[in-house]
Amino acid sequence: MTEPLIPKALQETLRGKPVCIHASMRSFRPRIDADALLDAVLDIDCTILVPAFTYALEQPPPPDGVPDRNGMDVDSARAAPGHDRRYDARGDTLSLADMGALPQAVLRRARERGEHPLNSFAAIGPLARDLIGRQTLQNVYGPFDGLLEHDGLVVLAGVGCTSMTLVHFAEERAGRRLFQRWAKDRDGRLVACATGSCSVAFDRFEPVLEGPSVDVSGSTWRILDANAATRAATDAILADASITACGRRSCLRCRDAVAGGPVPATPHS
Ligand SMILES: [Zn+2]
């Protein structure tokens, strides 16, 4: 009898839960493919949630409606060429090099995918519709609200905190407004959507986001309670906003995120 991919004790921890998984498929030895991992997670009745972002669909900002402190040089962003690529949640386009093979495998199956042209989430399992239905253009991290509500977990499978999208959700919980970016929807309309900031410095959250680690076929998995992790990351940001700053002078997103994000538009009197 062959050993299960996910050890029995870990199966019991994960069983039936919604789980946001960030995985490096290269961390498994011997290598396995993403479908084998996906099958192992779905076999224990989990709902798997993954980011399935599509950075290449971003468009230059429109002439009006760009908030101040939006983490960009507006003039040079407006000078960038536009294009006609559109977002369609029914399709399986994603930024493969950044997202990896697991989200790609999710998108190729029957799944739910959020209506967010740049930072969509995708999910498979009993709670998929519940989690993904919460994502809107401006509520990009709505699926994490669902993950917390359903007592879900985050799994870092052979990756560190720089891959952990939940930290962006913690930035929002700590009171930061999210940057506005633009893309074309299915009908070709330019829409504004809230997006995440720079995650280059998220390795600073390593001591904040410790959790039990389990060997899964050579890959070291860290298992985090989503509620506790959100609280810990939010508290760390509230204690020191600069924890998220990557330190690169050229990074306008970090500069503006630490300052609180975009300035809300003041209504005309
Ligand atoms: Zn940065």
Image: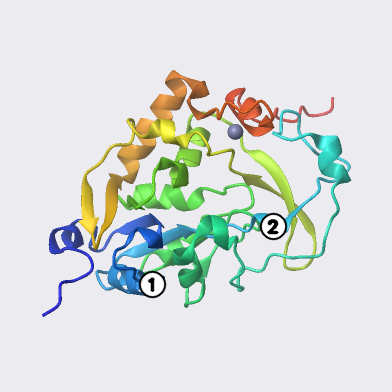
Three-letter amino acid code of the residue under disc 1 = Asp
Q: Residue at x 44, y 45 (%)?
A: 164
Q: Position of residue 73 (x, y in %)?
A: 79, 34
Q: Is mark 2 within 8 Å of ligand 1?
A: no
Left or right of 56, for residue 111? left
Q: For residue 161, what is the image quadrant?
A: top left
Give percent across and percent down for residue 235: 39, 26
Q: Is residue 53 left or right of residue 267?
A: left
User: Which corner quadrant of the figure contains ligand 1?
Assistant: top right
Residue ID for mark 1: 33
Taking depth in this image into account, of 62 and 105 the one nearest to the observer is 105
Dots 1, 2 in contact, CB < 8 A: no
For mark 2, what is the residue? 56
Q: Nearer the viewer, residue 47 or 83?
A: 83
Location of the N terminus (image quadrant): bottom left
Kindly tell me whether residue 202 is visible in this rendering. Answer: yes
The amino acid pointed to by label 2 is: Ala
Tell me the distance, in whole angstroms, between the alpha carbons under discs 1 and 2.
25 Å
- State whether residue 133 appears in this view: no
Other-residue count near label 2 (Cα within 10 Å), few / some / many at <14 / 14–19 / ≥20: some
